[in-house]
Image: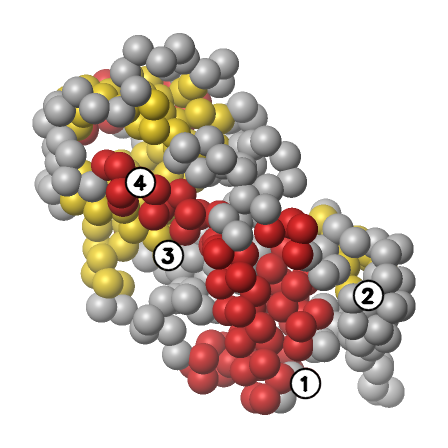
Amino acid sequence: MPELPEVEVVRAGLQAHVAGRTIADVEVLHERAIRRHLPGAADFTGRLAGVRVDAARRRGKYLWLELSDGAAVLAHLGMSGQMLMQPEGTPDEKHLRVRLRFADGGPELRFVDQRTFGGLALSDLVSSAGALLPSAIAHIALDPMDPAFDPAVAVRALRSRRTELKRALLDQTLVSGIGNIYADEALWRSKLHWARPTERLTAAQGRSVLAAATEVMADALTAGGTSFDALYVNVNGQSGYFERSLNVYGQADRPCRRCGTAVLREPFMNRSSYFCPRCQPRPRVRAS
């Protein structure tokens, strides 16, 4: 699933290409793509026709189009969802699911999703911590790149849980936007093992790992995100290239760029964790 930098790249592209434009009509080519919109395709298309897109917004890994009628189109990109801008008349992509045409006759917005894990849905906007969010994600915490993000609050939230540090970093109700890739990279930068108990995390360590997460995501954003295959692209169909700069994620058996020790891979929540056993020593188990 795309993480904060990848979603921010898409959001910025949508802001540049669709903000201020009025939707003329919507075509749903695969109803699974709007399965989260429970009223169905006719309601989805009918409510969007004639509505202006005011802005493209993001919190953490969640993306939405803010509409002039007080609602939002919440986009779940899933594993393979793409938001593409295409001139009208461009041949349809093989996995095109939803098409939005605009009243000005300019480029249309296409939601393309090969694996159909993603989708679009209309959601009301509600006030949450001083911001307007789609009601479906009002519980999501601020992310480290949000101007209102308070590291001290996030550190307290992390330390209040009795779990492993990486699990806490992935908990979007504590801090949003950090996924598997950038959690591993942030832990490597801060020299912390993924299994460190959060109740044994010092405030300084908490600040360090959150600062590292912010830095690595900013670096990834500059590189256009991380693309491991052709499924993650920006609105112009271009891939990011931050995968070339990854220090541990996906680097099993390769030398750590800091100390030369072979990077290890361990199973984690049906996924993997990558770390340097020397730079990120496993926490000692306390005797009971």
What residue does disc 4 label?
14
Give the number of the disc on residue 67: none
- The image quadrant where one finds the C terminus is bottom right
Going from the N terminus, do you reach mark 2 or mark 1 first? 1
Residue wearing tag 3: 59
**Hey, what amino acid is under mark 4?**
Leu
The amino acid at mark 1 is Arg
Q: Amino acid at mark 2?
A: Cys
Q: Amino acid at mark 3?
A: Arg
Does residue 35 appear in this view? no
The CA span between labels 2 and 1 is: 26 Å
Cα distance, mark 3 to mark 4?
Answer: 15 Å
Position of 92 compared to 247: left or right?
A: left
**In the image, residue 42 lies at what x, y percent?**
23, 18
Mark 3 element type:
strand
Q: Secondary structure at mark 1?
A: helix
Q: Nearer the viewer, residue 210 or 18?
A: 18
Which residue is identified by label 2?
256
| Residue 69 visible in the snapshot | yes
Left/right placement of residue 71 relative to residue 268 reads: left
Q: Nearer the viewer, mark 2 or mark 1?
A: 2
Name which quarter of the figure residue 28 lies in: top left
Q: Quadrant of the N terminus?
A: top right
The reply to whether discs 4 and 2 touch (Cβ–Cβ < 8 Å) is no
- The answer to which of marks 1 and 3 sits earlier in the sequence is 3
Q: Which one is in front, 146 or 285?
A: 146
Sequence order check, earlier mark of 4 and 2: 4
Mark 2–mark 3 Cα distance, whole angstroms, equals 32 Å
Please determine whether, in this image, residue 44 is positioned above or below residue 183: above
